Amino acid sequence: MLKKLKKLQNPLERYVFPLLLVLWPLAALRQGVSVMDTTYSLANYRYPQGAGTMWNIATFLANVTGRAFMALPVGKTMAGMNLLCLLLISLTALACYYVLGRMIPGWMIFCGEFLAAAFCWCPAVILYNYLTYLLLTLGTLFLFLAVSSVPEKKRYYILAGVCLGLNVTVRFSNLTQAALILALWFWCACAGKRFSAAAKRTLLCVSGYAAGFGAGYFLCAAMYGPAAYWQMIPQLFSAAGNVQSYTAAGMLLSTLSAYGHTLRWFLILVPCVIMGAIFFAMPLLRSKEWLKRLLYIAGIVVIVRFYYSRGMFNRNYQDYGSMFEWGMMLVILALILCVIGMAGAYGANPDERFLSAAVFVTILILPLGSNNYTYPVLNCMFITAPYTLWMLRRIWQETRHTATHFSWHAMTVMILCMTLVQGSLFHIFFAFRDGTDGIRRSAVIRTIPVAAGMHTTPENAQELEDLWQYLHSEGLTGTPAVVFGSAPGIHYLMELPPALDSAWPDLDSYPAEQFKEQLRQLKEDSLPLIILHEEEKPQSASSDEKCGELFDFMRDNAYQQAYTGGAYTVYTAAGKEQE
């Protein structure tokens, strides 16, 4: 049997696994029509002026890539854009599959990449995330190639720097990724390199970093002028400072909160492992080791049931609650393994210790620059997941003959199995902010051109198609509009260019004064449509103030209600009505 499996291993690793890594991210290609973040990004690509100068430049390369994708024939629809952007996930997974193969077995990398793709919860069209993850992963892989190549190839240090420097123009907060140089310095120390040798390698990385950033900057300068990028930086810090979750303290506290929340579940396993080790050390039933193992596994099943009963996870795979805690358990496990690997345990060589350090640094820096707790860590496990599997197997092999180690072996297998099951089902059924309450996405959009063929909930489909029918029949598609409420994607779906310099003006990061000034600048002879999205609770703290300004503007310009349907109400100025 083993010989047959060995014969299959080579064709599987050469052909089948790479194909599956291309196809697996595409599982939910046509699922979900959120009018928030997903279609907000698409609106920014389609109507560049709607992205706002500051945010447009802070995520410059992501927006340029999005517009380039949208210019392709396949990028004309939402499904087509999903396809193009999901292939970036496939590309990231394949890069890891081929590069890490020099250290980790192919089947193990495949399992890790399969798991990493399953946890990619963020909408694929938000390119400032997925381009970030691609370039960060490539930068790490190039550093890995640089330190592990014999003879050493200097170009890999430069290419690693190019990827990380270019990444700053994908999203300005990616500056923190320069911290990966710490992993390189750690490798130099482990390998016994002199300070001068470490400095030379650092200079190679810095030169590549400068070249990568320079390429993105000069493209930005060619489009917006040489001063635009530098003017963006103080504006960005000023805008971010107005939102508590974007401050350094806010990001740090939310990250620690996420780890602390999961740590309480993780710590429950520690006494269970200790008691298990004692149980296996006892002479009781020594001749029936299989029975002791069976009893312990039964106890693990009870623990999983306990977790479920306490709400640690659920079976609504259209919601984050099904996978988040298990994903974070894997991350905590990965951090523990990184410390073991960095310490050089179990005969780890400097190259292996470098990989441990690189994963450790990556996990720590990914939440920085985001207000999404530790979700960015879960969204970028392309190196973390295969590394974790590899380290666990390495330690298992060293300890497999000692009975007392079975308790933690079994417990880590439980974490891996639950992560795989919950993550995979989540990947198949989840769509960002569409049906997260468990309502099936059983309706298919038919009449809206850019969203044709997309699956959503019946209520969402009905409201959007009714709004499209009204706007299309009245000849209002293509009319500049202000959409207020958490529905910026209406601009993209209904083909309505933003009348302001933001498609999502009620965000806290869009200052109220700027909103007020933009309304003042609207001309009486070209007043926009105004579409209000009804919501139970405003998403932003500044929403009420801005809403008051908008109502004053509507009153001063004699706006009248022209359509209402579901959560959407359309208002037109008196002049528009007469036309």
Image: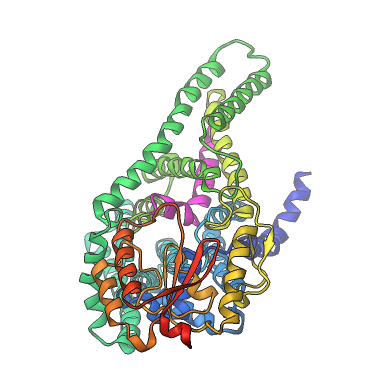
Q: Nearer the viewer, residue 476 or 315?
A: 476
* Residue 149 can be seen in this image: no
Residue 534 picture location, percent across and down:
46, 59
Q: Which quadrant holds residue 347?
A: top left
Highlighted magenta segment, given as a residue range: 372-400
Which quadrant would the N terminus be assigned to in this image? Answer: top right
* Residue 94 can be seen in this image: yes
Based on the picture, tell me whether residue 375 belongs to the magenta stretch: yes
Total number of numbered discs in the rendering = 0
Q: Nearer the viewer, residue 290 or 287?
A: 290
Q: Residue at x 33, y 47 (%)?
A: 254
356, above or below 408, in the image: below
Q: Residue at x 35, y 64 (%)?
A: 506
Residue 26 picture location, percent across and down:
63, 64
Residue 426 picture location, percent across and down:
59, 50
Q: Main secondary structure of the magenta part?
A: helix
Q: Residue at x 40, y 72 (%)?
A: 503
Residue 250 picture location, percent across and down:
28, 50
Based on the picture, tell me whether residue 36 belongs to the magenta stretch: no
Q: Nearer the viewer, residue 395 or 51?
A: 51
Report the colour scheme. rainbow
Q: Which quadrant holds residue 109?
A: bottom right
